[in-house]
């Protein structure tokens, strides 16, 4: 097995690699970042402050259909190219390496009289002293960079299309926030309310309240050295920082395997490319979750290695898998809601056969005939013991007949 990885800290980022600005602090606490069999030392802070090998290509061997093997070509920073054959490959190069810079969405940026760059290029606030800066995007990077620059800049504007919920790293009782509110019970309660992706920042609210960071709506256009916002306000700026996210990219993989659509990768359970005849290539860590990426990546890696060893075939449990996909589509039946609205139907969904009609009760593609079809489920089937036996063996008498 071969794991594609690189770790580095340097002043000038290299194309195709992630960058870490000097002031970065991990958003997740150390306990949430830990590997399951390697707890962090007690003397490390709750939120920690922040080999170079280039992979040139990953190709299927000629006998891939039979062996599932891969040919990997690498190159050291100072050294020759090498080619090795591996039984399996895990791609864990991260998804913060290829900046998404949507310049076409910002008319006039090409003729902007100041300078602009992506947050990927940001290391520190040096050279921004006394400048007027607009940061576009209010994700974690956008918030961090706006705070960092606000300590030296004349003005900092933070532009956002839809706003964000900002949470701190410290929770109740002085404990890390992601330790206090992430129990299984908390997650069950949160499913009852609208969901959002928060921005983690201890300093941003204070910088906004003090006026050091001014929140602005989305940018409409740039005119000379001016930035025009969608609310009609105009401000003169010297620097634009695009904190607009990243694109997925696998330049070392064959184009046929680079199955991507916008920001979404076509991967089974966010891990396995479905087009492969042999499940010997896995992608780990290309997922965003509400919490630390480390446990997610570790679980993906543990699963991938068991699949490689043929201890876990790529099979699914019927109902859980249907429900998980239906959840994404927005058509999973809500049994608790049905209990209040239509108790008879709720019992049929809960105790009767799990038929496809259950996923047409609500949401996209809703079918008015779904309720009747669920009530009649099984009545059109012929029993080897005759219809009388079938009616006597129904799992619950409340399921008999149409409403």
Image (spheres, rainbow, N blue to C red):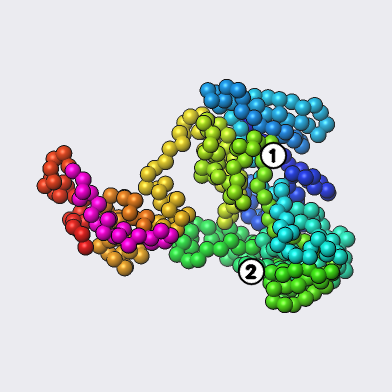
Q: Which residues are magenta?
A: 361-382
Q: Main secondary structure of the magenta part?
A: loop
Where does residue 141 sit, x and y in percent of width and height? 71, 58
Which element is circle 2 on? loop
Q: Residue at x 58, y 34 (%)?
A: 281
Against 344, is 1 above or below? above
The correct choice, above or below, for 381 with respect to 200 in the image is: above
Residue 261 in sight here: yes
In front here: 309 or 173? 309
Residue 252 coordinates in the image, percent (x, y): 69, 36
Q: Tell me the residue at 35%/63% (across/down).
A: 336
Marked residue nearer the N-terminal end (2 or 1)? 2
Give the residue furthest to the bottom.
232
Comparing marks 2 and 1, which lies closer to the viewer? 1
Report whether residue 45 is seen: no
Q: Quadrant of the C terminus?
A: bottom left
Quarter-wise, where is residue 24 in the image? Answer: bottom right
Mark 2 is surrounded, within 10 Å at the Cα level, by few (under 14), some (14 to 19) or many (20 or more) other residues, namely: some
- Where on the picture, by quarter, is residue 297? top right
Looking at the image, residue 136 sits to the left or right of residue 335; the answer is: right
Q: Which mark is residue 163?
A: 2
The residue to which callout 1 is attached is 251
Of 170 and 161, the residue lying toward us = 161
């Amino acid at each position: 097995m071969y794991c594609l990885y690189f770790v580095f800290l340097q002043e000038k980022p290299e194309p195709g690699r992630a960058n870490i600005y000097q002031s970065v602090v991990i958003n997740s606490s150390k306990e949430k970042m830990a590997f399951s069999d390697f707890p962090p030392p007690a003397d490390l802070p709750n939120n920690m402050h922040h080999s170079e090998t280039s992979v040139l290509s990953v190709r299927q061997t000629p006998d891939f259909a039979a062996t599932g093997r891969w040919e990997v070509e690498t190159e050291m920073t100072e050294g020759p190219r090498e080619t090795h054959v591996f039984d399996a490959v895990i791609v864990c190069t991260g998804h913060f390496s290829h900046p998404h810079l949507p310049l076409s969405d910002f008319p006039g940026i090409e003729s902007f009289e100041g300078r602009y760059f992506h947050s990927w290029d940001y290391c520190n606030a040096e050279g921004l002293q006394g400048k007027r800066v607009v940061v576009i995007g209010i994700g974690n990077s956008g918030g961090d960079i706006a705070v960092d620059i606000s300590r030296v800049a004349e003005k900092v504007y933070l532009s956002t299309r839809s706003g964000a919920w900002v949470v701190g790293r410290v929770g109740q009782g002085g404990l890390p926030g992601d330790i206090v509110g992430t129990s299984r019970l908390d997650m069950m309660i949160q499913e009852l309310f609208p969901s959002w992706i928060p921005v983690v920042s201890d300093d941003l609210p204070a910088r906004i309240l003090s006026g050091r960071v001014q929140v602005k709506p989305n940018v409409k256009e740039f005119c000379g050295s001016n930035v025009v916002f969608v609310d009609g306000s105009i401000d003169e700026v010297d620097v634009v920082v695009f904190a607009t996210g990243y694109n997925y990219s696998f330049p070392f993989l064959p184009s046929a395997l680079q199955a991507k659509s916008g920001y979404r990768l076509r991967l089974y359970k966010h891990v396995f490319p479905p087009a492969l005849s042999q499940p010997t290539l896995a992608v780990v860590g290309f997922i965003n979750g509400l919490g630390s990426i480390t446990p997610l990546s570790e679980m993906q890696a543990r699963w991938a290695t068991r699949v490689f060893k043929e201890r876990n075939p790529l099979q699914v449990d019927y109902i859980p898998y249907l429900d998980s996909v239906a959840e994404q589509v927005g058509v999973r039946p809500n049994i608790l809601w049905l209990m209040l609205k239509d108790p008879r139907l709720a019992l049929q969904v809960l105790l009767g056969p799990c038929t496809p009609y259950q996923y047409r009760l609500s949401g996209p593609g809703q079918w008015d005939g779904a309720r009747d079809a669920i009530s009649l489920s099984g009545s059109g089937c012929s029993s080897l013991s005759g219809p009388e036996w079938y009616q006597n063996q129904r799992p619950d008498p409340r399921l008999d007949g149409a409403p």
